[in-house]
Image: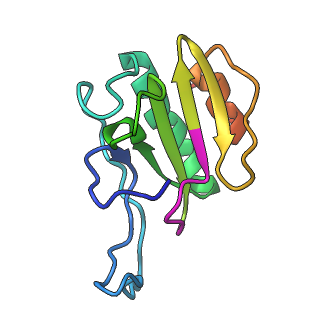
Amino acid sequence: MQRTSGRKASIGATQPRRPSGRRSPVVSYRPAPVVLPLAEPFRALTPDERVYLQCWWKQASSAGIETIEDLMTRPWPRPVAETIIGVFRTGEDLATWMVIGQDGAWVVASCSDGTVSGASDTLAAALARIHPVDDSF
């Protein structure tokens, strides 16, 4: 799943690109966190899940997770799930993982090797499969 150009449905920042598609030379670059509005992106998540997702991303960003994107804002050929979250590693244009939620169950699909985790009961448990974090936030 390729990263979208807009940032309205994502957490994190991307480096600007030249028209040629190559990255612009940047001397110093640091992703700037984006505050999640509770009504927009990730609207299928509960307010507590949105807060958890943002806190998880803040901790996981130190391990190379650059952006998290609500992939439900994209056109799909048919209904696929209640929630699809793309997780992008630093410098990657394609999602490394997709976190998929349906009927209270969550799985993590690896976009690199096609594996899908077993079901988890919570978003937090699914995200911990990608990067465990200190839940004391």
Taking the spot 75% from the left edge, 52% from the top edge, the residue there is: 113
Q: Is residue 100 above or below residue 46?
A: below
How did the renderer colour the structure? rainbow
x then y, percent, for residue 119 = 71, 20
> Looking at this view, is 69 or 77 the one in front?
77
Q: Who is closer to the viewer here, 71 or 30? A: 71
Q: Taking 116 as reference, is 38 above or below it?
A: above
Residue at 44% across / 22% down in the picture? 82
Q: Position of residue 5 (x, y in %)?
A: 30, 61
* Left or right of residue 112, residue 24 in this image: left
46 relative to 74, above or below: above
Is residue 134 visible in the rendered image? The answer is no
Q: Could you say where residue 15 lies in the image, as x and y percent from the top left?
A: 38, 71
- In magenta stretch: residue 97: yes
Dividing the picture into quarters, in which one does residue 135 lie? top right
Residue 59 or residue 95, whichever sits in front: 95
| Residue 122 visible in rendering | yes
* Count of numbered badges drawn on the protein: 0
Residue lying at 33% horizontally and 42% vertically, measured from the top left: 75
Residue 133 shown left or right of residue 70 in the figure: right
Q: Nearer the viewer, residue 61 or 83?
A: 83
Q: Position of residue 108 (x, y in %)?
A: 65, 35
Q: Judge whether residue 37 is colored magenta.
A: no
Magenta span dominant secondary structure: loop
Q: Which residues are magenta?
A: 91-98
Direction from residue 100 to residue 7 in the image, left or right = left
Q: Quadrant of residue 29?
A: bottom left
